Image (cartoon, coloured by chain):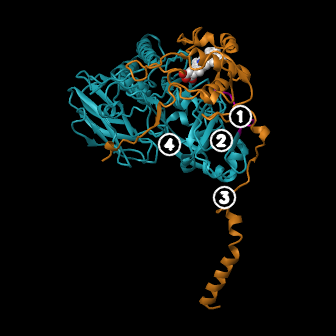
Chain colours: A cyan, B orange
């Protein structure tokens, strides 16, 4: 393991280095904020703030609401509205219904946000879901990770059309209203960017699970199966690929195997019970369960059936894996089985020995999660974790594992097995497979087992074990 | 009516009802008729150009013309010598160089060293560049700037004319550098 290392091209290396600096700044800012709270009356009352320090791992919890009377002096976090906090909420009237204009916001005490990867240009960039703060299995729509290649477009749904053409009997165009007339399906699926973890091949690089795994999110999606649209236009003999094109400034394009399109592709307009978010492709997105994130074309405006892939920039220059022999692997579309412990995870601190409920997420692009195992001794012994949500195809599950920490250094790991029998590999296994011999430049599709080191003082760090 | 008769009557009712059932429940519906025909005019502005060049528009350009297009529209972000510009707020990729580095410890992926098809370059520049005003170049300008990049990369001669016929014939250095992914890796199964 020590002498095998992954080769990053210059651009990837620069970006990774910059991300390390940015993450360090963000963590420092967060710590400063926590200290600030002692003197700045209001946002986090003194007593609760001390509390917070003690239970660092519960950052963002509601611990602080109770015991102070104060104006909400600081700007509310994104997605929240700041209100004055009464000493005793049972002694004053609350807010009247409707004051929010009819659309709710999150609590002013919930501060977690997406963090942007510091690419030089913010129009082609990505942001990470704060997995360390997420509960349950579904990602809040406003915290779903993002990847845009030239900004987020503003699209009026009444002007938006989907064109379906190429090797079809009758090319057609559909308005959003047309699409919503078809019988719909609603399914829960994860989307993961194949670049998730790209900084982590050679050494533990980013500190938090947001940085190492935050290009993963799960939503309940609602839309029309592509198969229904295919019947509508009629497929000609010989079609094997479908070009999907977005209506953004990158006019994003990917070629998708027709077989996949017919099997389970959805044209989705709904996310978690409401219209899909602009960052996620409003008003229409291609949803390819289990496929690498980039293929799930957002702001979908066109599907062209063809007898060959189009060899677009995103499937040649990018999203290909350069191997040691100088050849690159192309069309790596499935996201392999993977899992990660989100609590405890990097940059948290356990207050002392005792009981902890280890929890995390597991997923596979090839079907259901069959089992999740947890190890507290760097993979020497494994115990089955409890799966806390129903395992669905190409969807995350939340898992849990009761652990009594004895106060000694430990290495926490989780391992996913999916219904095909595939077992999530160690990093050594993965590098052995992909690296052949010598150097390699395959930075996408890192699905190795993640290790979190717990030190004697309770601090948790990203380690390679 | 005996039980037998009732059963028969019920069966008849069912039979009679069958032709109506699909209308009432639309269960067997495979065709809804939603949407409108897309006319050639509707589709005229769309393009996606595969390796064989089908869909390449009329027009042409040379490196000499392309040098000017590049200087006016690209160099601010990709550098005067196509070397890229990693500066904050810009981040334009390096476009040439890196040939022969792919199997080394410091691979440099560029249009010259990595891209398998020249048609992809045309497609991408026409659709997505210049980054700050995508789709603003004429087809002649795109052919020209593509000719310029390819000639700076020493893939085509400075005098070669790029058009719908010549572009798909350009032999990119890494033309055979890609293979379909052989995953899944069987050793990771039980």
Rounded to the nearest whole Å, what is the CA distance between mark 2 and mark 4?
25 Å
Tell me: residue A60, above or below residue A296.
above
Mark 4 crowd level (few <14, some 14–19, many ≥20, 10 Å Cα): many
Rounded to the nearest whole Å, what is the CA distance between mark 3 and mark 4?
26 Å
- Tag 3 near tag 2, CB within 8 Å: no
What residue sits right under mark 4 in the picture?
Answer: A189
Asked if both marks, 4 and 1, belong to the same chain, the answer given is no
The subunit letter for the residue under badge 2 reads: A
Residue A127: give x, y in percent of width and height. Answer: 51, 25
Q: Nearer the viewer, mark 3 or mark 2?
A: 2
Mark 1 crowd level (few <14, some 14–19, many ≥20, 10 Å Cα): few
- Closer to the camera in the image, B150 or B6: B150
Residue A34: give x, y in percent of width and height. Answer: 42, 16
Asked if both marks, 3 and 2, belong to the same chain, the answer given is no
Q: Quadrant of residue B146?
A: top right
Q: Secondary structure at mark 2?
A: strand
Q: Magenta stretch? A: A152-161
Q: Nearer the viewer, mark 1 or mark 3?
A: 1
What residue sits right under mark 2 in the picture?
Answer: A304
Spot the residue most to the bottom.
B2
The subunit letter for the residue under badge 3 reads: B
- Check residue B46 in the rendering and tell me which mark sits there, or answer none: 1
Q: Secondary structure at mark 1?
A: loop
- Tag 2 near tag 1, CB within 8 Å: yes
Residue B19: give x, y in percent of width and height. Answer: 71, 71
């Amino acid at each position: 393991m020590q002498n095998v290392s992954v080769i990053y091209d210059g651009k990837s290396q620069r970006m990774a280095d910059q991300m390390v600096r940015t993450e360090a700044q963000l963590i420092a800012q967060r710590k400063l904020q926590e200290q600030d709270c002692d003197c700045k009356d209001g946002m986090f009352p003194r007593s609760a703030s001390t509390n917070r320090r003690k239970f660092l791992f519960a950052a963002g919890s509601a611990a602080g609401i109770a015991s102070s009377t104060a104006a909400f002096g600081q700007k509310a976090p994104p997605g929240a509205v700041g209100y004055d906090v009464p000493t005793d909420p049972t002694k004053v009237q609350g807010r009247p219904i409707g004051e929010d204009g009819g659309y709710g916001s999150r609590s002013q005490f919930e501060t977690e946000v997406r963090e942007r990867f510091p690419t030089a240009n913010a129009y082609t960039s990505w942001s990470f879901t704060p997995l360390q703060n997420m509960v349950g299995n579904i990602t809040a729509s406003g915290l779903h990770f993002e990847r845009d290649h030239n900004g987020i477009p503003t699209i009026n749904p009444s002007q938006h059309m989907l064109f379906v053409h190429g090797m079809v009997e009758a090319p057609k165009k559909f308005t959003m209203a047309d699409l919503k007339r078809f019988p719909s399906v609603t399914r829960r699926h994860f989307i993961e960017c194949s670049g998730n973890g790209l900084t982590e091949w050679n050494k533990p690089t980013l500190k938090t699970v947001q940085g190492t795994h935050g290009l993963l999110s799960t939503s309940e999606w609602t839309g029309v199966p592509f198969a229904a649209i295919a019947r509508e236009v009629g497929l000609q003999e010989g079609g094997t690929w479908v070009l999907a094109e977005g209506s953004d400034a990158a006019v994003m394009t990917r070629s998708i195997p027709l077989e996949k399109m017919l099997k389970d592709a959805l044209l989705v307009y709904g996310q978690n019970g409401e219209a899909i978010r602009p960052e996620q492709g409003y008003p229409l997105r291609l949803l390819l369960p289990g496929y690498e994130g980039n293929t799930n074309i957002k702001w979908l405006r066109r599907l062209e059936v063809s007898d060959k892939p189009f060899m677009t920039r995103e499937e040649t220059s990018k999203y290909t894996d350069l191997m040691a022999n100088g050849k690159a692997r192309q069309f790596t579309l499935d996201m392999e089985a993977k899992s990660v412990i989100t609590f405890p995870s990097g940059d948290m601190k356990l207050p002392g020995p005792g009981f902890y409920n280890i929890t995390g997420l597991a997923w596979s692009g090839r079907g259901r999660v069959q089992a999740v195992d947890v190890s507290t001794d760097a993979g020497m012994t494994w115990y089955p974790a409890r799966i806390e949500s129903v395992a669905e195809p190409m969807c995350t599950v939340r898992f849990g594992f009761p652990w009594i920490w004895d106060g000694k250094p430990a290495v926490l790991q989780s391992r996913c097995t999916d219904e095909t029998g595939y077992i999530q590999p160690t990093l050594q296994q993965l590098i052995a497979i992909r690296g052949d011999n010598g150097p390699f430049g395959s930075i996408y599709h890192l699905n190795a087992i993640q290790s979190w080191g717990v030190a004697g003082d309770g601090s948790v760090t990203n380690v390679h074990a | 009516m005996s039980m037998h008769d009732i059963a028969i009557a019920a069966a008849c009712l069912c039979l009679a009802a069958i032709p109506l059932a699909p209308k009432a429940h639309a269960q067997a519906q495979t065709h809804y008729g939603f949407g409108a025909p897309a006319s050639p005019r509707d589709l005229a502005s769309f393009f996606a150009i595969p390796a064989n060049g089908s869909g390449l528009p009329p027009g042409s350009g040379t490196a000499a013309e392309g040098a000017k297009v590049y200087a006016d529209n690209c160099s601010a972000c990709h550098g005067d010598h196509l070397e890229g510009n990693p500066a904050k707020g810009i981040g334009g990729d390096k476009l040439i160089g890196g040939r022969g580095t792919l199997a080394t410890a410091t691979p440099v992926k560029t249009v010259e060293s990595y891209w398998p098809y020249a048609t992809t370059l045309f497609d991408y520049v026409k659709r997505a560049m210049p980054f700050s005003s995508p789709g603003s170049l004429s087809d002649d300008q795109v052919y020209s700037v593509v000719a310029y990049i390819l000639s700076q990369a020493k893939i085509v001669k400075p005098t070669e004319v790029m058009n719908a016929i010549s572009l798909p014939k350009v032999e990119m250095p890494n033309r055979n550098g890609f293979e379909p992914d052989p995953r899944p890796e069987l050793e990771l199964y039980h």
